[in-house]
Amino acid sequence: MTVASCTPHPDELYLPVGTQVQGYYVVTVGQEVGIFFQWLDAKVRVDGISGASHTRYDHWADALELYTSHYNMGLLCAVPTVGGPFWPVGTTHPTPLPSPTTTASSTNSKDLWSYLEDLSECAPLTQAEKASRALKAAQRKKSEKALSDTISSFLDNQDKKMKDIGASHNVTEAHVKKLITYHMHYKKSRGPQLFNVLVHAKNQEVNGDRPVGSKLKIQEIRQMVTHDPAMQKENLTEGEIKEYMAQLQEHRTLKTGGLHSNNIAAAQDVNATTDRIRRELLSLMGYARGHVNDQTPATWYATDDATDFWEDVLDLMLNDIVRKFEQWACSQGKNIVEHDSLKNMQKQVGRLILSGLRQMTGKDNIGMNYPNYIKSIVLSYSIILDGWPATIPFTSPWNIHTVSEI
């Protein structure tokens, strides 16, 4: 059975006088603790209590059982309302609860106070309270209406003035409104400061011919500018100042767009170029036969502007590329001397081992670690290389220097 949802303010809670409280416990019925969280937090900090807890029940019987069990265990309890009645929904009489005073006197106090939230019907307002609230509501509505009327009058006058401005300057009202309300046509000057201009000029003068490692530091150059009479503003002409500023502007422009290895713009250009190469290569596929007896012709497929990349950047035709690819595929390592050479066999064994390792681990970027094979491969991935001859010590194929062993 649920109870009526009317919760007293926490300030209405009371404690029996002369009791030392060490903890707070709130039980609510039918709703969350709500406003009690703030009250409990304040009480905990003011009274120096270690903490507070809360339990919520949907049914009145469960809350009443918990409330009663606290008395049976000897815990002091208090009802946080005047008189302490509780009104379950559907009943005409309040449910009586044990008296905190009699319970406290008949049990051993454990200094833990349990608060059960009162959800009884709120007390009706008096005629004076109703009249006071009605007067405040009327005053609030009157103030809100006055503010609304003032704003409406201002907007009407603003629209009329914007129409007049547009008519006098032969522009639309929307254009005037955009200029007034949506954009700020102010731009702060970010030109070079005179002191920085003079520091740059002095730096070019004293460090221009010095080798790297012997150049003066910026702090020293600033001191030189400060103590140089010829670098003072009152001793400089307007033409000299403009010339110094032009030199600094040219220097900054060169740093922004020049080709320097540590220039951010140059690095971004390199990244963009390499990214385009990567994307274009992903859009190109070339196919060629691997043996002279194969009948399949060399073929290429390209998407987007991959063909334009090869022709514009590398100055190569795709037909020429696939023909050279076919020639290389048919002749690479196919003669008897190259096929049976130590270098070629080492390469083949290394490729077979690496491809098997990547297939078993499912990692395309893994490499074979021959010196630490047990630790880095066997123990890490629980796989072993099967088929290695027992008469040959396990090592890298490139460390085997005889054709018979490889």
Image (cartoon, rainbow, N blue to C red):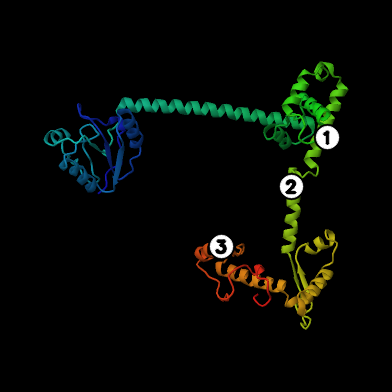
Residue 332 percent coordinates (x, y): 77, 74
Mark 2 crowd level (few <14, some 14–19, many ≥20, 10 Å Cα): some
Q: Amino acid at mark 2?
A: Ala
Of callouts 1 and 2, the N-terminal one:
1
At label 1, the amino acid type is Glu
The residue nearer to you, when weighing 132 against 223, is 223
- Separation (CA) of disc 1 from disc 3: 57 Å
Which residue position is annotated with label 3? Answer: 372
Note whether residue 166 is visible. yes
Instruction: Tell me if residue 340 comes above or below residue 148 in the rendering.
Output: below
Element type at mark 3: loop
Question: Which sits earlier in the primary sequence, circle 3 or circle 2?
Answer: 2
Pointer 1 with pointer 3, Cβ within 8 A: no
Residue at mark 1: 250
Distance of label 3 from label 2 (alpha carbons)? 38 Å
Q: Residue at x 75, y 24 (%)?
A: 222
| Residue picked out by circle 2 | 267
Image quadrant in which you'd find residue 365: bottom right
What separation in Å lies between label 1 and label 2 (alpha carbons)? 20 Å
x and y percentages locating residue 184 in the rendered image: 70, 32
